Amino acid sequence: MSELFEAVSDLLYREAAFIDRCQWSEWLELFTEDVQYWIPCWDDDGKLTGDPQSEISLIFYDSRKGLEDRVVRIRSGFSAASVTMPRTCHQVTNIRIEKAVGDSLEVGAAWTAHSYHLGQTKIFYGFYDYRLRRVNDAWRICSKKITIVNDVIPTLLDIFSV
């Protein structure tokens, strides 16, 4: 396995583990300041919305500040979606480096997220599309698009759900 593929895989696996272990500070460190974190919606004709600035999204943050804000609310105990925190297990598979240009990578992966909360188990699955950037000799996430394939969502959706 190439060193680049190992580094990319490690980054994606660490991100999933940090979410599952509620290691929010470590999770946030994986993102660049200008990260775009986006979960588009499916529209009526079975296509994903294409522009988070002008179309409905399930979640959209246009900087790490937005993610930091969300983490503050999760930690505070004042977030309805995270009182009591669900127990999650994220699995990342089929990792592919789609394009490499200089210090930038486009990466795709498949994912499954299992969640247990208040006696109920839920499963979400779909695709991740990342743009990674090399920052101070480490790969960081500068864009993450999360496509949820089973988008009939029976509960609140949050950053730890997918």
Image: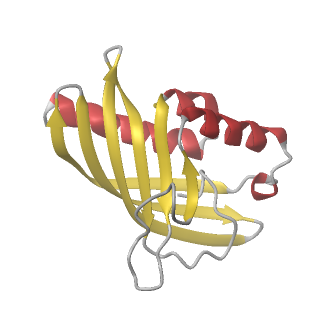
Quadrant of the drawing holding the N terminus = top left
Residue furthest out toward the left? 2
| Horizontal side of residue 96 vs 151, given as left or right | left
**Residue found 50% across the figure and 69% down from its top:** 41
| Horizontal side of residue 137 vs 160, given as left or right | left
User: Residue 93 placed where, x, y %?
Assistant: 32, 55
User: Residue 62 placed where, x, y %?
Assistant: 53, 42
Relative depth, front residue between 118 and 59: 59
**Residue found 47% across the figure and 84% down from its top:** 44
Relative depth, front residue between 34 and 115: 34
Q: Is residue 99 above or below residue 39?
A: above
Can the viewer see residue 23?
Answer: no
Residue furthest out toward the front? 54
**Residue found 76% across the figure and 53% down from its top:** 82
User: Residue 56 placed where, x, y %?
Assistant: 55, 66
Relative depth, front residue between 70 and 26: 70
Q: Is residue 7 above or below residue 43?
A: above
Can the viewer see residue 18?
Answer: yes
Tally the marks.
0
| Horizontal side of residue 71 vs 13, given as left or right | right
Residue furthest out toward the bottom? 45
User: Residue 150 placed where, x, y %?
Assistant: 48, 76
